[in-house]
Image: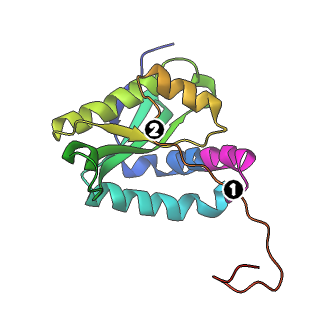
Amino acid sequence: MPLPAVRAYRDSDRAAVIEALVGLQDHEVALHDTRLPGRQIAEPYLAQLLGLVARHAGAVLVAETGGGFAGFVACYIAEDEVIAETPDSNRYGYVSDIFVAPDRRGSGLAQALLAAAERHFAAAGIARLRIGVLAANRMACRAYEKHGFEPYEIVYEKRLARLTGAKPGVPA
């Protein structure tokens, strides 16, 4: 397979990125019950994402192979105010989304997209890169670990049974 060309998002990429977002979301729908259907969220999510990227020195980078869409990565600078953490931990690059076309999975394209995001952040003086993933998405976890990511924080969730007749803040 030819090496991918990674470049900045263009308005002409919109339809392909929308379809990629639908695919990403529908994959996550199968992994967790908190996710809404891809067709329901893809367009407003892309608008939100492009706004975040514009406001927070980010980028949407598109990978092409043979002149066709092969995937994308979206990333931006996130800033927290956690008193207990170092300044370089409070200002970091965040990869919000990454998609590789099904026929390109396992080809190293995810690694190429993540490397492009790293270069974007290195140019901005960012020292740390973070990415989120559903715990059940083992394939993505393996790809991120292969690229050198390590678990940083783990968020656990417990679904609470609805208590009938209980008032908010009052134990049942």
Q: Secondary structure at mark 1?
A: loop
Q: What is the number of the mark on residue 72?
A: 2
Amino acid type at image mark 1: Lys
**Image quadrant of residue 168?**
bottom right
**Image quadrant of residue 9?**
top left
How crowded pointer 1 is (Cα within 10 Å; few <14, some 14-19, many 20+) is rated as few
The residue nearer to you, when weighing 1 against 94, is: 94
Give coordinates of residue 144: x percent, y percent: 48, 28
Left or right of 21, for residue 118? left
Question: What residue lies at 37% left-to-right and 25% top-to-bottom?
Answer: 5
Give coordinates of residue 85: x percent, y percent: 27, 48
Question: What residue lies at 76% left-to-right and 83% top-to-bottom?
Answer: 166
Amino acid type at image mark 2: Phe
Q: Secondary structure at mark 2?
A: strand
Left or right of 116, for residue 68? right
User: Which residue is the site of mark 1?
Assistant: 158
Question: What residue lies at 49% left-to-right and 34% top-to-bottom?
Answer: 71
| 54 w.r.t. 97: above or below | below
What range is drawn magenta here?
A: 22-36
Residue 99 appears in the rendering: yes
Q: Main secondary structure of the magenta part?
A: helix
Q: CA distance from mark 1 to mark 2?
A: 32 Å
The residue nearer to you, when weighing 24 against 134, is: 134
**Image quadrant of residue 51?**
bottom left
Question: What residue lies at 20% left-to-right and 34% top-to-bottom?
Answer: 122
| 165 w.r.t. 19: above or below | below
The residue nearer to you, when weighing 67 against 143, is: 143
User: Is 32 covered by the magenta stretch?
Assistant: yes
